[in-house]
Amino acid sequence: MRLPTAILLILFLLPCAALAQGDTRITFLGRQLEKGRDPRARSQAALVLGATEDPEAVTPLCGALKDPSELVRAAVAKGLGSLLEPGGLDCLQAFQGETDASVQAAVAESIKAIKAYQARRPRFYLALDTLKDKTGGIPPELVKVTEARLRSKLVRRGAQMAPVKETKAAAKGALKKMGVHGYRITAEIQATDSGGLRLAILCMSYPEQSLMGQVEVNAAGAPPADLLKALIPRAIEEAAATFEWSSET
């Protein structure tokens, strides 16, 4: 495994129609799920929410588990199973008293899927620091949402997240047991000279915390929420390739 002492990668994202959708998609689908008159339309909204891979979709889906339609409740359960978020598991486990057989089956299947996802063998071990807003102008709630999305994408990439304030001895024990490499990353939201945003990820070895380098991705031409949502997967892709997060010991 290579351990570069200083790496700087810059990826510019061109403005596009996809960036303009951003969080409004989750809001729109959540509204459709809550207020749509046709159960089929609400069911479709639930399934699409489950396919977004966005932790923000957990809230509207969990709220819809009480929908009067069995068709919708079953779709919501399937959506939560597709989303694979820990919060979705909590909702499903609290809803196992469902009386309809089809909904019961969907709930049980999704609980099984999320538990299997959580139990899969990790590809690397990761300590994630609190996301920092260096622009001073990003709303705190958006910073929180961005950090949740960053964490979710890292887990999907194969990360096993280290506990907060884990001791060095405990970290070494976990790494030995899993047989993978450990990393610590600090992510920052920064402003660019062009008026856009930059997501910078500083990576260190873990638990030794030797500097490995930094990657940066920039974007402009859309509201901050849309830019940050677009930057997260790009930054993770660059960091994973640069620091070889998939490598085993």
Image: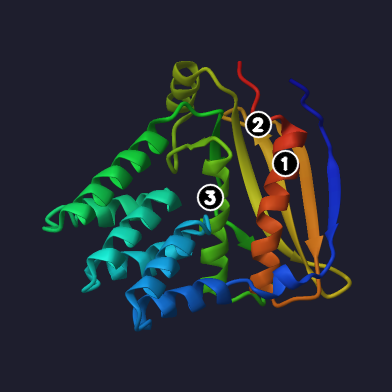
| Residue pointed to by mark 2 | 245
Residue at the spot x=46%, y=26% of the render?
Answer: 121
Q: Are marks 2 and 3 in contact (CB under 8 Å)?
A: no
- Name the residue furthest right: 194
Nearer to us in this view, 160 or 184: 160
Q: How would you rate the neighbour count of disc 2 (Cα within 10 Å): few for under 14, some for 14-19, many for 20 or more? A: many
Q: How is the image coloured?
A: rainbow
Q: Is 181 left, or right, of 110 in this rendering? A: right
Residue 136, image x, y percentages: 67, 74
Q: Quadrant of the C terminus?
A: top right
Q: CA distance from mark 2 to mark 3?
A: 15 Å
Identified by mark 2, the residue type is Trp
Which residue shows up at 31% across the image and 64% down it? Answer: 62
Query: Is disc 1 placed on a helix, strand or loop?
Result: helix
Q: Quadrant of residue 70?
A: bottom left
CA separation in Å, label 1 and label 2: 8 Å
The answer to which quarter of the image holds residue 42 is: bottom left
Residue neighbourhood size for the residue with mark 1, other residues' Cα within 10 Å, grouped as few (<14), some (14–19), many (≥20):
many
User: Any mark on residue 130, and which?
Assistant: none
| Residue bearing mark 1 | 239
* CB-based contact (under 8 Å), mark 1 and mark 2: yes
Mark number, residue 151: 3
Q: Earlier in the sequence, mark 2 or mark 3?
A: 3
Residue type indicated by callout 1: Ala
Identify the residue at horizontal 64%, vertical 28% (top origin): 246
Q: Which quadrant would the N terminus be assigned to in this image?
A: top right
Indicate the secondary structure of the residue bearing disc 3.
helix
Q: How far separated are the C-alphas under marks 3 and 1? A: 14 Å
Q: Amino acid at mark 3?
A: Arg
Q: 29 or 36, which is in the foreground?
A: 36
